Amino acid sequence: MLDNLNLLVFAPYLGVQLLLDGIFIGAIFALAAYGLALVWGVMNVKNLSQGEFVIMGGYFAWYMSTYGIHPMYALPVAIIGMFGFGWVVYKTIISRVVEKDMFTSLLATFGLAIVIQQGLNLAFGPEVQVAESGFPTHTVPIWGGEITIAEIRFYSFLICCVLAGGVVTFMKKSRMGQAIRATAQDVRAAKVMGIDTEKVFAFTYALNAAICGAAGVLISMIWVIQPFYGITHSIRSFVIVTAAGFGNLAGVLMASFGLGVAEQYGGFIFGAELQQATVVGMLLLVLIWRQIQMNRLRQAVQ
Amino acid sequence: MRHFTKWSLAAAATVAMMGTSQIAYAAADCKELILGSAISFTGKYSTNGIHAKRGYDIAVKKINETGGVKIGANCYKFSIKYYDDESTPARTAQLLERLIKQDSVKYFLGPYSSATTKAAAPVIEKYKIPMVEAEGASRSLFNKGYRYLFAVLSTSEQYLASSIALAAEIAKKNGKKPGDVKVAMAFEQDPFSLDVRAGVVDDIKKYGLKIVIDDKLPRDLSDMSATLTKVKALKPDLLLISGHSKGAVTAARQIKELNIKTPMIAITHCESGKIVSKFGASTNGFLCPTQWAETLSYKGEAFGSAADYDKLFKATYDGYKTVPYQAAQASAAVLVWKDAFERAGSLDTEKVRDAIAATNMKTFYGGIKFAPAGNNIAKPMVLRQIQNGEYKVVAPAKWASSKIEHPRMVK
């Protein structure tokens, strides 16, 4: 561990590489996390199948690439396909549990996650898959060309920014977006004002699935996908949303970048096996810090 | 009376025809000899489980077609009773109990994977029933004193060990001291990869090389750029990676992305990860260990040479560009059973077990001779290098069909 810290001190360009990788990948985490924040905030459903939606999106890209279609074209297909899937899942499962207590919805989405995993396994087999973009890697001509930027990571970053921007504008400007925000504030009041909350819920859940699908397409071109890899993406989304709170896009973005960078540094300093542990450890610290903050606040009120 | 004869003749003919159509290759006087196996048709091991099943089936078919098994004066035909263990070790153990107790099977072929074989071993020990397995390579299977477990494949600590000898040899040729050869290692924390690591570490000590990175990879690995960034900084001469197909795929992708220039890279599971078709030319020069390759000059009874087996397998099953070694070793396990039954001249499990223990045969899959612990010591692990998108055997020298390219070409 000390050796690794030493390395960072003596070769600072490594830190830059880790930082870049972390930010690029963090942008993709932000997508799935924002989707979770949306569903959590609007309908109070903690969607445990979040990661599975991401992986499903990845399979769109992989499947199309086996037919010689460039995986980038899978982006609109996955968004539309997953939107439809999300709608169907809402109508068949989530609409029945949305009014129930937290544990019912947790159980239902957990069950859904298992069904999706096994379904993907049956359909496509358990092998690890990738969708190859074929984009080249560039070396940055400083520090002896040791820093590399893969074009695909850069494009993914841009796509994430565009998608996030699109969703935010939609929420602010469109009627449906306003309805979603109204429902998030108060379901009963929204109903009284004539908003069809059932439709809002269905739309929110479908939108979440679509965002996850887009994230999955990008993940399949940067990392690897496998039917059972959803869980790590679910955990990341939960960590980010817990740290940032929902209804706070800026917070979600910052937390996502922070998590991406922390993962890279954690992996470098503590070793790859503790990469995930670093993230969960950080969540713990955030929660403890929040607790202390709140205690202080309570005392001040007294 | 004439009426009766006519009818009975017709009936006899029908029965005979039904017989031939159902068991096309069964000669009339051969009895059935059942081997049992609980193997993975569904779940995470299903792909390789099915390769292994096809390996078993093709060997059974071949043996039955060429006269069956001769035990004393009697002739037997193999058949295999399968159950699907759903890739879960606990299920493997349950199904073996069922095969032994309900189906009265007394001779076993192995499941797929070390994990399921580990669950199977105590069961067959308990009932004193021999098993010849072909798909469990973990060395922990062979240090528990199991008496009824035999494996035809090389154990996992041999997977990457030969690359160390190769690196030391190349260093010597280039006038470098072994102590100057820097090795970077990244191994998953699972029984298989830890075995591979143990074998590598032993050989690193033996040759006196220097370990500069020793990273552990997580089970759900999809990013190892942190480890590879370290590789960039420390510039090792040899990079070793083992983490099943996900490790191979992740490593191949990120070695390309991060432009890693290490002159020698050895990775397990290149074939099952299909890294050549996924990443093309960037994988040229990777060293990949394999249990078996169709280009090896092994020969034996039943199947002939390795190349003959390759041809027969491809003709029997559609959709194989290369024959997976998992299928080849499964076939070899069935050959061991035939050989042992014939030498034992008996169906008694103890006698057959002793005959298996005394096996010393040459097959298309390589030599088979069991150590007292049950592992095969007559067949080395082979190292292949990806050259122009093709796997070429480069080590050990005795079987090599091509020369190693060193340092590997980096664009």
Image (cartoon, coloured by chain):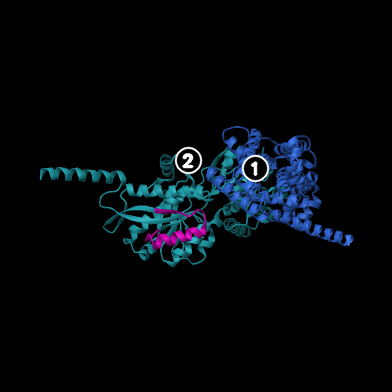
Question: Residue B268 location, x and y as percent?
Answer: 58, 49
Q: Nearer the viewer, residue A180 or B81?
A: A180
B78 lies above or below B280: below
Residue B292 makes an appearance in the image: no
Residue holding disc 1:
B253
Say if the magenta span includes residue B124. no
Between the residue at mark 2 and the residue at mark 1, the CA separation in whole angstroms equals 24 Å
Location of mark 2 (residue): B320
Image location (x, y in percent) of residue B149: 45, 62
Horizontal and vertical percent position of residue A237: 71, 49
Q: Where's the C terminus of chain B, which quadrant? A: top right
Q: Is residue A276 above or below residue A145?
A: below
As shown in the figure, which amino acid type bears the numbered disc 2? Answer: Tyr
Residue stretch rendered in magenta on the structure: B81-107
Q: Which mark is residue B50?
A: none
Please tell me whether mark 2 sits on a helix, a strand or a loop. loop
Chain B painted colour: cyan
Residue A135, picture quadrant: top right
B179 left or right of B388? right
| Other-residue count near label 1 (Cα within 10 Å), few / some / many at <14 / 14–19 / ≥20 | many
Taking the magenta stretch, the answer to whether it contains residue B93 is yes
The colour of chain A is blue
Nearest to N terminus: mark 2 or mark 1: 1
Residue B51, visible in the rendered structure: yes
Tell me the element at label 1: helix
In this view, the residue farthest toward the left is B1
Residue visible at 78% across and 44% down in the picture: A249
In the foreground, A77 or A132: A77
